[in-house]
Image: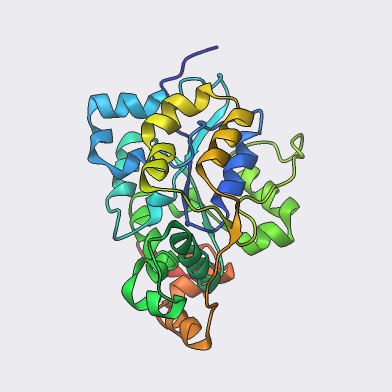
Amino acid sequence: MAITDRPPDFLIIGAMKAGTTTLYRWLKGHPQVFMPEEKEPNDLCDDAVLDESGQKAYLRLFRSARPGQRIGEASTAYTKRPVQEGVAARARAVCSPSLRLIYMVRDPVARSYSHYRHELGNGRITASFEEALDSEPDLIGFSRYAYQLEPWLEVFDPACLLVVRLEDLHQSPDLVSRRVLAHLGLPETGYSEPFVQANVGGQRRRFRGELSRRMVQSRMYQRRIKALIPRSLRVGIRNALLPPAHQVEASGVTDAARRKVLGALTEGDRALAEGTWPPVLDSSGHATQPAN
């Protein structure tokens, strides 16, 4: 098998809880696409990737790609401002100027609530959704799609970006698959695998302890150990570490909570969530905000 030192041809940059795992797994199964075993490598979140050693470590993620395959990775942390800043600039330094970007969005309230349930399941949040919106700004911030895309559109041509709505993936999967493949320069026929939704429903497993969580989420496990363990055995290990899945108890989305999320959004955020793209360009050709 040939060894590649090519940087990725495309990135799935987020948003968290908007279907990125579903898209990652679907593309990973495409014979003309290579994606590493580890979803969320997050290398571009750290300035270390700009050093020679850091860049080599990043490129090693893709060393098993075959000649001619499109290379990509998926890290939702790449659109988690202000927790992560400078990601787009690092991508521009490490990758090609023609890097293709895929950004998945979702109804902002639904995304924020799913994010809340994720944190509730991890035990990091115990408050109600409405209360958590006041104490956890990322619940709304990661749903501010135009805000999250601003740095990417400052360093990459808007034509490099494809925005995919999770609602469209559910309602028109064939259309979404054709759009994604066309964006990546791949034939729109010849690959007919269906999208298999990941992280479905309200089922989450709680880690028995912080040590277990850190172990299975560690870079060592994800990059070195996971690839050596058959999937069936990994499932067995995961089931040993995690108790049976359960329905997360949550208070639901009140009208007041919905107003809090929607009231924090700009016109650009809303337009992206509603599927209005490409953005409006100013007289110098720079992106301003998505068209209404």
Query: Height in image: 209 above or below 192?
Result: below
* Residue 44: quarter of image: top left
Furthest residue toward bottom: 256
Between 239 and 252, which is closer to the camera in this rendering?
239
- Judged left or right of residue 199, residue 161 is left
Q: Residue 166 appears at what percent x and percent y?
A: 61, 60
Q: Residue at x 43, y 29 (%)?
A: 223
Between 134 and 173, which is closer to the camera in this rendering?
134
Q: Residue at x 43, y 83 (%)?
A: 260
Q: Residue at x 60, y 34 (%)?
A: 236
- Judged left or right of residue 48, residue 155 is right
Q: How many marks?
A: 0
Q: Residue 173 appears at what percent x and percent y?
A: 72, 54
Give the colouring mode of the picture: rainbow
Q: Residue at x 54, y 34 (%)?
A: 237
Quarter of the figure that contains the N terminus: top right
* Residue 182: quarter of image: top right
* Residue 95: quarter of image: top left
Q: Would residue 286 be seen by someone viewing this image from the given angle?
A: no
Query: Height in image: 224 above or below 215?
Result: above
- Judged left or right of residue 3, residue 153 is left
Q: Would residue 141 be seen by someone viewing this image from the given angle?
A: yes
Q: Residue 217 appears at what percent x and percent y?
A: 42, 41
Q: Residue 92 appears at what percent x and percent y?
A: 33, 41
